[in-house]
Amino acid sequence: MPLVLSEMLGDGIARIAINQPEKRNAVGPDVRDELMAKVTDALSDDAVHAIVLGSEGGHFCAGGDITSMADIDVLSGRRRMQENHKMVKLLAEAEKPLIAAVEGFAVGAGAGIALLCDSIVLAEGGTIGFPFFRVGLTPDYGILFTLPRRVGSAKARQILLRGQMLKGAEAVTEGLADEIAEDGGAEARAMEIAREMAAAPPHAFALAKRHLTMEPQTLEAALEMEAMSQSLAFVGPELAEGRAAFMEKRKPDFRGEKE
């Protein structure tokens, strides 16, 4: 049985789902490696315009697989984290839209994976949480970078140092997730968002994602980034198509997929 499922759902949307329900989709090295491979394939496939990260069995991801952490020493632990960081960078640097569909638990590493996505849809009964201290660990999977950027540094401090678990509407209110969906409906809503993002001009979308990740700290830096990226956009085919669609009062087709 594959640990990670991958399928095309039409309109250029790929669904990638952890498939280890007996462990609530906990992530160990084997799941991590298979997830990386599936995401890499989707990112390199021109037929894929957006990716929905989902799950099987009712839980998004219950964190790192504790059963795989026996007999780890400092050196092997560092190697494990370096491999984990390859996946963090893969998701963080993805130029295509990534939408997380969270049912059940997205805690620990599972929360980290969700926070690396562009949009998070959380089921009403779903929980995003950070219980690292309960098992004697510190936050990982990029959470010290992504969480403050979502909720602010002061709120992130409280969430992490108190090991908070935020459920449903509260998680959305606090900024941990972007939308709420009925239980069992997170993936359906995530697909709608994926189709919306997939319709964007891919080059311009990728540039905007990169700038948001870099998060310029001064107005001067932001304006310089704008000047560099927009000068490329001005001479690209996406503006030509967008302008033509505007003038012709039609929906733009940025991928040349007109029937």
Image (cartoon, rainbow, N blue to C red):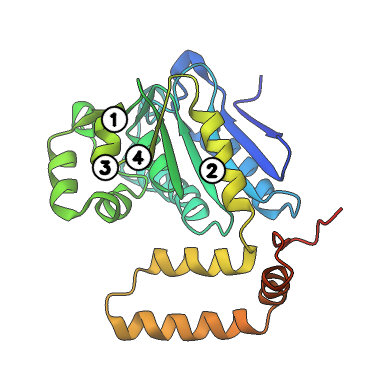
Vertical side of 258 occupied by 15: above or below: above
Vertical side of 83 occupied by 5: above or below: above
Left or right: where 175 falls relative to 78: left
Give the CA separation, mark 1 to mark 2.
19 Å
Q: Residue 139, which numbered label?
A: 3
Tell me residue 1's x, y (percent).
66, 19
Q: Which kind of residue does numbered mark 4 sit on?
A: Ala
Which residue matches tag 4? 177
Contact check, label 4 and label 3, Cβ < 8 Å: no
Mark 4 vs mark 3, foreground winner is: 4
Q: Which kind of residue does numbered mark 3 sit on?
A: Pro
Give the CA separation, mark 4 to mark 2.
13 Å
Give the CA separation, mark 3 to mark 2.
29 Å
| SS type, badge 3 | loop
Q: Residue furthest right?
A: 259
Mark 4 vs mark 2, foreground winner is: 2
